[in-house]
Amino acid sequence: MKKAIVVFASGTGSNFKNIVEKIKIHNLDAEVVLLVSNNSNCNAVTFAKKNNIKTFIYNSKKYPNDFNQDILLKKIKQYEIDLIILAGYMKKISKNLIKNYKNKILNIHPSLLPKYGGKGFYGMKVHEAVYANKDKKTGATVHFVDEDYDTGPILIQKEINLKLDEKPSKISDKVLELEHEIYFKSVRLFCEDKILWKNNKPLIKE
Ligand code: GAR
């Protein structure tokens, strides 16, 4: 049965777009029912509007006293949803939200977690660190979200080799391509009910 997804994004939204495109070509039996963003001017919001996807702008300027994200939760609860995906979302999700959607929130991170995870490591910062450390490989990780940054149970992780002296922008391009591949794969596994939980770890049903 078709799954209802809420996407959270803060920037370019290429991961978000990729999921929507896969839905359009019937590679994913799902619907994005809402896009949540902290940034009303980002490309992800523009893309959502163009594609008739409802948007909700949520930030501390608009809701300065909503410390537990109750307003956000209430908004999401208006929809009967199956999955939340964070696609380049640069804000922390509250415990409140995580408790309400246990094992139903996915995140993509542009590194081989636990390497380069945690507060301060996001987007280009990750690739700059990989470059500065002369790492020979990097990758991307899809994981379920728990109460800390980038620490939740890993669903899929994939690595790539780096050539000598590949610059951060090049690393970013390569990793993003990988992200699109494994995020789509992860979301599809979820939508096809192919993830089972054992001892708090997600396993993929073959
Ligand atoms: C992606 O590389 C994603 O992994 C990263 O932000 C980028 C967003 O790109 N997310 C994080 O660093 C989260 N900690 P996109 O807007 O084109 O999907």
Image (cartoon, helix red, strand yellow):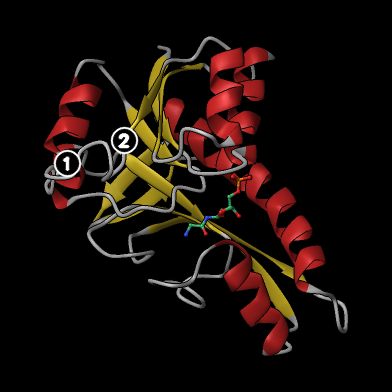
* Image coordinates for residue 196, horizontal then vertical, percent: 33, 42
* Image coordinates for residue 27, horizontal then vertical, percent: 64, 20
Q: Identify which residue is drawn at 58% across, 61% down.
A: 123
Q: In this view, does 51 lie above or below 197?
A: above
Q: Which residue is more in the foreground, 188 or 173?
A: 173
> What amino acid does circle 1 point to?
Gln
Q: Residue furthest front?
A: 61
Q: Do the residues labelled 1 and 2 touch (CB within 8 Å)?
A: yes
Q: Mark 2 falls on what kind of element?
A: loop
* Image coordinates for residue 175, horizontal then vertical, percent: 70, 59
Dot 2, crowdedness within 10 Å: few (<14), some or many (≥20)? some
Which residue in the structure is indicated by mark 1? 69
Q: Identify which residue is drawn at 56% across, 37% down.
A: 42
Marked residue nearer the N-terminal end (1 or 2): 2
In this picture, residue 178 sits left or right of residue 79: right
Q: Is residue 202 above or below residue 184?
A: below
Q: Which residue is more in the foreground, 55 or 21?
A: 55
Which residue in the structure is indicated by mark 2? 58
